[in-house]
Amino acid sequence: MNTQKNTIVAIDIAKMSLQIQIGKSAFELLNTPRGFDALIKRFVKLSKPLVICEASGGYERALVRALHDADVPVAVVNPARVRAFAKSEGVHAKTDPIDAKMLLRFAKNKDLRLTERPDEAKEELSALMDRRNQVSATLTREKNRLEKEPLYTRKFIEESIDFLEKQLADLDTCIAAIIENDVALKSSVEAMKAVKGVGEVTAHAILAYLPDLTDISRGQLVSLAGLAPFNRESGKTKIKAHIHGGRAKVRKCLYMAAQSAARFNDVIKEYVARLVAKGKPYKSALVAAMRKLLIHLQSLLKKQKLELV
């Protein structure tokens, strides 16, 4: 996106505060609805304001929602990209004012992709899937502890496991209700589950963590999911390409789906076998299968989206 005609508003977001940089002007507001209102009122005096902020572990969500409600364009960027940019500029110090200034410089030097207004159902689905992942991870740890705990502590772990299993079931019920009550989400889940190897959890994760799946290119999708292999070559030195970055929550589910598909999906099974026969390590072949599955799912959902228009 060309930002030359916009007034860039860079915001470094903390739990309680917003550090704002507009040109050479800097100020701080609270990360609260009152702070959002005060910020948006200042936009009246600006020419085509465009906000840039980092994904901050969820602390940015309320602000982004308020900006969308006020029809202010906003770009939420990956903090790792901004940090790498800062280091490339020779800036190693890290404070809220410095981070806000660096965001402003980043916005002026890089192409920005606007963050679309989140769909309410997908936003709720994403939050529930986050909680499901937390509960599932904790449940796994508790079950592992149970295997080696002495008798006098087993009771407490078993009670914890019962509680977590109930909460996991309740979360699955809530997620199923969201899918059932949204025609587009329901048809998307059904389309993905028709692909052998792809189950409900994988379908839900893709919808929750790749909400713009049908609006980006294949290359962008693969990169966003962290499935793009990066070459590392210099002169005669050649290091095996590895995948890097991206959305780990999607990648984890896709890995399980690819393992299942490599056994029961004839297309993926043949694809993986062919790569292994050519000398590819099995795990590398699985990663390739993950890419193939994801691109196929994107194609299915794009076709479905066109049919619904």
Image (spheres, rainbow, N blue to C red):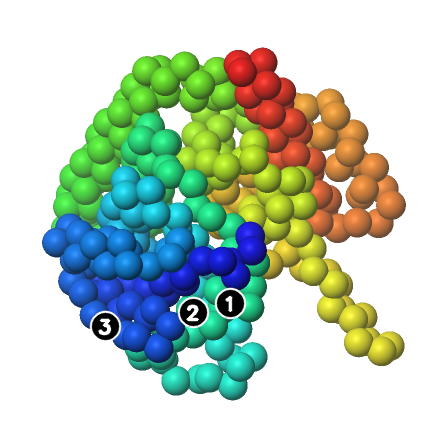
Real-space CA distance between mark 3 and mark 1, rounded to the nearest whole angstrom: 20 Å
Describe residue 218's horizontal placement relative to residue 201 as left or right: right
Q: Nearer the viewer, residue 275 or 193?
A: 193
Q: Position of residue 303 (x, y in %)?
A: 62, 20
Mark 3 in CB contact with mark 1 (< 8 angstroms): no
Residue assigned mark 2: 104
Vertical position of residue 141 compared to residue 120: above or below: below
Q: Residues within 10 Å of mark 1 (few under 14, many from 20)?
A: some
The crowd level at tag 2 (other Cα within 10 Å; few <14, some 14-19, many 20+) is: many
On screen, residue 103 above or below 48: below
Residue under the point 54% across and 16% down: 309
Which residue does the numbered mark 1 point to in the structure image?
108
- Residue at 56% x, 35% y is 215
Q: Residue at x 46, y 84 (%)?
A: 91
The reply to whether discs 1 and 2 touch (Cβ–Cβ < 8 Å) is yes
- Which residue has dot 3 on it? 27
Q: CA gap, disc 2 to disc 3?
A: 14 Å
Q: Relative to 3, does residue 126 appear above or below in the rendering?
A: above
Tag 3, which secondary structure? Answer: strand
Q: Is any atom of residue 226 visible in this view?
A: yes
Q: Amino acid at mark 2?
A: Leu
Q: Position of residue 242 (x, y in %)?
A: 67, 59
Q: In the image, residue 19 lies at what x, y percent?
A: 26, 69
Q: Amino acid at mark 3?
A: Phe
Q: Please, what is the three-letter code of the amino acid marked with disc 1? A: Lys
Which corner quadrant of the image does residue 240 belong to? bottom right
Q: Using the image, determine if residue 108 lies above or below residue 122.
A: below
Image location (x, y in percent) of residue 10: 37, 65
Q: How many marks?
A: 3
> Is tag 3's residue or tag 1's residue first in the polypeptide sequence?
3
**Mark nearer the N terminus (2 vs 3):** 3
